Amino acid sequence: VKGFVAWSCLEGNCTEANMEIEGGDYKLTKQLQSGSMLIYNCPEGYYPYPALTRLCQRNGSWKPLPRRYLPQKCRLVECPDPNVLEYGNVSPPQEKYFVDNETTYECYAGYTHRGSSRRVCLPNGKWSGTTPICSRDTGDDCADPGIPPGAIRTGNIFGVGDTVKYSCNRKLFLMGSSERMCLENGQWTGIEPACYFKHTYDTPLEVSQAFGSGIKDTLTTLEPVDDIQEGRTIRIQKNGTLNIYIAVDISESISEEYINNSKEAVEMLVTKISTFTVTPNYEILFFSAEISEVVKITDFLENRPVNIKQELKKFKASEKHTGTDLNRVFKTFLERMAFIKQRVGEESFKEHRHVIIVFTDGAFNMGGSPAPTVAKIKNLVYMNHTVEGETKTQPRDEYLDIYMFGIGEDIYEPDLKALTAGSDGQHFFKLKDTNTLKQTFDEIISEGELVGLCGLHRDYVTDDGNSRKMYPWMAFIKIQVNVSNENLRNCLGSLVTPQFVLTAAHCFSFGDLPEHVTVDIDDGNGKIKKVQNFTLHPNYNINAKVKEGVKEFYDYDVALIQLSEEVKISTSVRPICIPCTQETKGALKLLDDSNCKQQEELLLNNQVERLSFLSKKGSWVFEKDVRAKLGDNRDACINHALQAPGVSTHDPKKVVTDNFLCTGGRTYYREHIACNGDSGSAVFKNFKNRTIQVALVSWGTKDMCKLSNNQFSDDSSRDFHINLFRVVPFLKTILGNNDQNEYTPLNFLSS
């Protein structure tokens, strides 16, 4: 009791005396109350010195205490010393290297240069480019692995079975592998090492590439099991199960902004994962000294419905979340794994893969070290067993990945790095703050030329206002009308494979040649793409029913453009999913024995189906909302085709065949209408975070945009769109053609 009274008397708020920082500012997570974290901020290219942060203690003092003789200031970011190059020169030679300092590298005579010949010190404390290496052909089995800036290497023999070891100079700590061994295939084990200062951090792009590479392989399910994708073995069998465990630090040193950003990042990660064919089980918790389970993996095992986004939004941190017990996090995950093993049995548990992802500021002051608990998790998953006193380890490293994200200004890197697990790839990341965390996860699972990942997109406009990543499949088609190129016909289209664009047949006229056509898709290798060929549907004939009172007949109004070269797939350029393909089956998460009809029933299953298409006005692209009238509503919709110019027949079905979807009017909603230049635009539906094209814009009864610059339909205006489910044989003939070696065909399903 006496101790409690004495402690209470010492409690008090901290002050802001001597907290100023020259060249920067600071923020407080909980004002000046006990437990508040003071976080210094500096402009890009600078870091706070000597303290990155200060913690307000219960006795009203800051830890660490400010020092009068060492005032707080923003110091220019320093990069590790590059003068570790063997058998070469570094210019200019300096004692220290700071942001924007440039270095060049030259090898001695008789030595071959690999890596970057020029490097620049970046604002995050890293050198641009790759480690320069000067080596001589000595007949070794492995190439010289080099020495990263700021590092020391022991070992100069590179034969099979030989090892090299790394450590860091001065106040640097090692990232990557401290020891690497030369393998028979000429490769080194582990990850290329790097030396970091305390102020060094990974950029969102670096994290997204490294983390995305590992997690993408986990989420991609292909058969056979030993199939190779991007140089790595696909690990999950079709009948395997993936369990993902996510933990977010919300201890007293964490700000509310951190918590909100982390929740958004977790939601983004779950959203991205949902685009894959794997459907994981999730355990999501927030932790301090206490554990708050937001999503329980047991609910997935019991087949109870779980709305992850809703549960994340409901969670609020409370005053009870003080201290940090990281060991308790891993104990909780260990308990859940043990429960799963007991429930499904040992044989089935062998097919379970486990991915643990932890976000923390790196300080754990309660519960002891998590390392022993992590060792138990490895034993459980790896299924180590003892035979006659000797532990036998099965080669099951690929069944467990533990990713640690150290986030913040002052984390304990070595402790967190020691908790990671995984057979290859980087598993520890250091991010400057949570502001870039959402961007980081938005970038993962988006690169790579996986045609099977059609329809991936962002659901918001990026900070630069670029909508390209929301509609990465959009294409702008220009057709030269005359030799002087004074007039152009403009249409829209959709990228459906890396080399093919889908559009409307009526965009083309008799006499058009491939050299008259260009496609605008900015993939980083030039916006304007040349066309190798274009093919119209063989049944398209605009004059087919002139004698029947239909001046222009648009049935089978579909065409495919083959580009001269494949576009480069990225977050900004990616194919849309089209009906009746294996790729779309994966996007819709349908069973292996599903067919084309089931896709149509899933995507067009309502009497009034909400769809979208793109419209272009000047340099602006915007999305329009329409409702397709299906079933009993269709006849009333297509009757308005009789009011179109050039139509004298009294039978609407002569004008609008079953190959069309009908939209427009104001009966149910005030719908958008297509404008001149929208022809060929994809009519699409976003389904489970993937975009599926179900039709394309063909023709309409009224040009509302020309009449009053109005983008909306009136009571009688209607648009008609070619239903792609009705032209699958044509698409399959070209896109699914296996009798050619020019391009990779799509895999079409049976009807």
Image: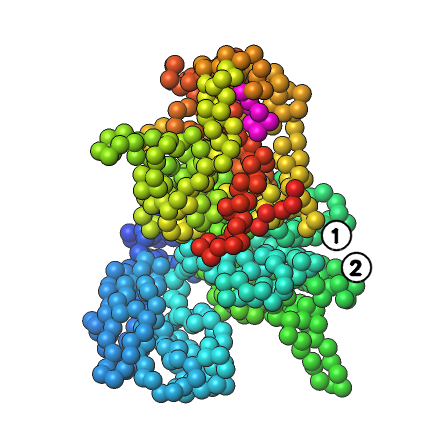
Give the residue type at disc 1: Leu
The residue carrying pointer 2 sits among few (fewer than 14), some (14 to 19) or many (20 or more) residues within 10 Å by Cα, namely few
Mark 2–mark 1 Cα distance, whole angstroms, equals: 9 Å
Whole-percent x, y for residue 370 in the image: 61, 67
* Label of residue 343 in the image: 2
- Label 1: which residue? 301
Residue 591 vertical placement versus 241 (above, below): above
Is residue 423 among the parts visible in the rendering?
yes
Q: Are marks 2 and 1 in contact (CB under 8 Å)?
A: yes
**Which residue is at 63% across, 65% downward?**
225
User: Which structural element holds mark 1?
Assistant: helix
Which region is colored magenta? 655-663
Return the residue nearer the eye: 385 or 476: 476
Point out the image quarter for the C terminus: top right
Looking at the image, residue 101 sits to the left or right of residue 643; the answer is left
Residue 180 vertical placement versus 286 (above, below): below
Whole-percent x, y for residue 598 in the image: 67, 40
* Label of residue 525 in the image: none
- Of label 2 and label 1, which has the lower sequence position? 1
